[in-house]
Image (spheres, coloured by chain):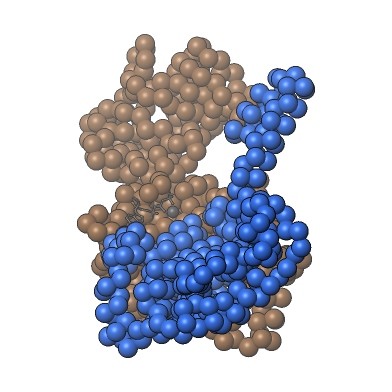
Amino acid sequence: MAPILDVQGLFKNYGTTEILKDINVSIDKGDFLVLVGPSGCGKSTLLNCIAGLEPISGGAIRIGDQDMTHVSPKDRNIAMVFQSYALYPTMTVAKNITFGMQVRGVDKATQATKLAEVAKQLQIEALLQRRPGQLSGGQRQRVAMGRALVRDPQLFLFDEPLSNLDAKLRVEMRTEIKRLHQDLGASMVYVTHDQIEAMTLATKIVVMKGGVIQQVGTPAEIYNRPANTFVADFMGSPAMNLIPARTSAAATGARIEIARAGATPLILHDPRATGLPADILLGLRPEDITEDGTRQGDLVQPGECLVDVVEPAGADTYVVSQLGGRRVTARLGADTRARPGKPLAFSFDLTKVSYFAPQTGERLN
Amino acid sequence: MTDISARTRANQQSPTARIALRWGLYAILFIFALYYLMPLFVMLTTSLKSLEEIRTGSLVALPRSVTFEAWATAWSGACTGIKCEGLQPYFWNSVLLAVPAVLISTLIGAMNGYVIAQWRFKGANLIFSLMLFGCFIPFQVVLLPMARTLGFLNIAGTIPGLIFVHVIYGIGFTTLFFRNYYVTIPSDLVKAAKIDGAGFFRIFWSIFLPLSLPIVVVTVIWQFTQIWNDFLFGVSFSQAGTQPITVALNNIVNSTTGVKEYNVDMAAAIIAALPTLFVYVVAGKYFIRGLTAGSVKG
Ligand SMILES: Nc1ncnc2c1ncn2[C@@H]1O[C@H](COP(=O)(O)OP(=O)(O)OP(=O)(O)O)[C@@H](O)[C@H]1O
Ligand SMILES: [Mg+2]
């Protein structure tokens, strides 16, 4: 089956500045693609290019196996939800939702049925006669979704639809969007700079930086096997620990030596690692550094470190210490014995370890 | 901000001092109001007096016996040069001239503002700057080229000719008003409408015009006042029969022979000023609101 969206070698310049460089993404029907990246990396620009709201400087865009590169937005069979919602201020909610159908000359009866359907789905029946100015942020968000849903497009585009909501409502709407995606089996492209949103919603994530794609993959791939230090650092909270280390070949695999403040170096052994350069960055998620004795496994190895800071966070307690000259965060249970200024025995679980080249930041294993 | 600090300062003063300050403020406002109302008062009372009373009485005295004769004369009997039909025909000339000129220039300004603010094209800023420049060209400078243009278009000395002149001269201002209003409207609105399938004109009619009431009111008041009160274009580009009311007023005041009929002059002046007053009274509150209107809440 042909992909529902296929972006091939897309470039976008504003004047002489390159905003997007050689973007290649494709998604299949029913995929939920999330674009993440820091502010200004070109996520909205890419979405606008897909929507046809911005002309592109190079490459091609195919939607539903049709070349849409030069097709106007209205004929791309897409719907878009904007960060600002962009509801028409003088129209009622009902008119906002039906405006598109009205413009396209859909007959009144069909309009009414579809409106009722969408209003029911989003539970906004009671709001239909109000104007956007008389709605709360969450309600506006729903209306904006309604306007997109009623189009029943091949592809939904969302530009940070939840970023204007408060934390609680954001979580609620996130779940709702996920449910909509499951119910409709719709194909979606969703922009956010919230990496939790990305992890929870996506079937496929694109991490961008400075207009260049850093990695494309499933949430698990992105989380467990980040392609470079940027992705490792950007996805996950707290971020992945990136610890400078020296390696040497051992009888099996590699011997890893990490400088430890005021003590002999910490030695770890990874039997699977081969061909690593002498200097590396060792990437370990906070949850893979635990209190000694709480985790079993072939690749779990002990090591003692001085605890700098203890940060209780409800279910977990984050414990910060120093390794290889960097701050290293471990995620321990709420009942941890860790005390600031005291040494603590940790376990390092190398099952999901990542190795990066210190200069290029590229993944090595 | 200033309001709050003023209030806290006022709170620190004793109640008597506060009341004294209040009354002092009212007194000053009252004096200024009187000062500004004085000419209107003199005009009104004079227009209601007979010539006899004007000659004998004091300028600021109330009329002893009220008569509307001067008003009747000013409306339909006063002489403007050789004809003695009063202001009436010229009043209608002005209406026929001002109404279309206001509507056309407002509509064109709205369109221009919409294009410049929301459909940014190459050179949009340059065009806008040139239009702004047009606002500040003195009337006198355009008189000769305009006369030639009107002659070329074969509408010299006609009301359509005058409409043309006022529309051209007004576009700079109306564009400025609408452009500044429309740049505060988020561009996502246009994007959303484009995806909904609406085109250039549809977006203008269905989304931007309905949002524009405050700025339309501002523009209409501004344009109406400008065009109705214009004298220079009126006197330059009209001929007998197409003159606007300002020109006729001038003729009435200047062409009376013998005794100067001050009461008729005053009545005529008030009649000539009434429509602009009327427009402001009817739409004034929107005018203030429109001038201070900010961005639109989505
Ligand atoms: N009309 C424009 N002209 C010139 N540069 C632009 C224009 N629009 C956007 N840019 C630039 O393009 C880059 C990408 O912008 P974009 O809005 O796509 O970022 P983003 O990833 O969506 O960021 P955010 O998370 O803050 O929304 C930015 O550096 C921005 O300054
Ligand atoms: Mg953005």
B43 to A303, vertically: above or below: below
Relative to A187, is A62 on the left or the right?
A: left
Quarter of the image where the C terminus of chain A is located: top left
In front here: B35 or B192?
A: B35
Q: Residue at x 26, y 74 (%)?
A: B145
In the figure, the shade used to draw chain B is: blue
- Residue B269: x and y in percent read 57, 66
Using the rendered image of the protein, determine whether residue B270 is visible from the camera's viewpoint.
no
> In the figure, residue B286 lies in which quadrant?
bottom right
A221 to A104, vertically: above or below: above
Q: Residue at x 50, y 83 (%)?
A: B83
> In the figure, residue B70 lies in which quadrant?
bottom right
In front here: B1 or B117?
A: B1
> In the figure, residue A246 lies in which quadrant?
top left
In front here: A316 or A98?
A: A98
Using the rendered image of the protein, determine whether residue A334 is visible from the camera's viewpoint.
yes
- Residue B79: x and y in percent read 53, 78
In front here: B240 or B151?
A: B240
| Count of numbered badges drawn on the protein | 0
Relative to A284, is A342 on the left or the right?
A: right
- Residue B77: x and y in percent read 60, 79
Relative to A166, is B102 on the left or the right?
A: left
Q: Residue at x 60, y 48 (%)?
A: B36
Chain identity for the colour brown used in the image = A
- Residue A256: x and y in percent read 32, 28
Q: Residue at x 54, y 55 (%)?
A: B291
Quarter of the image where the N terminus of chain A is located: bottom left
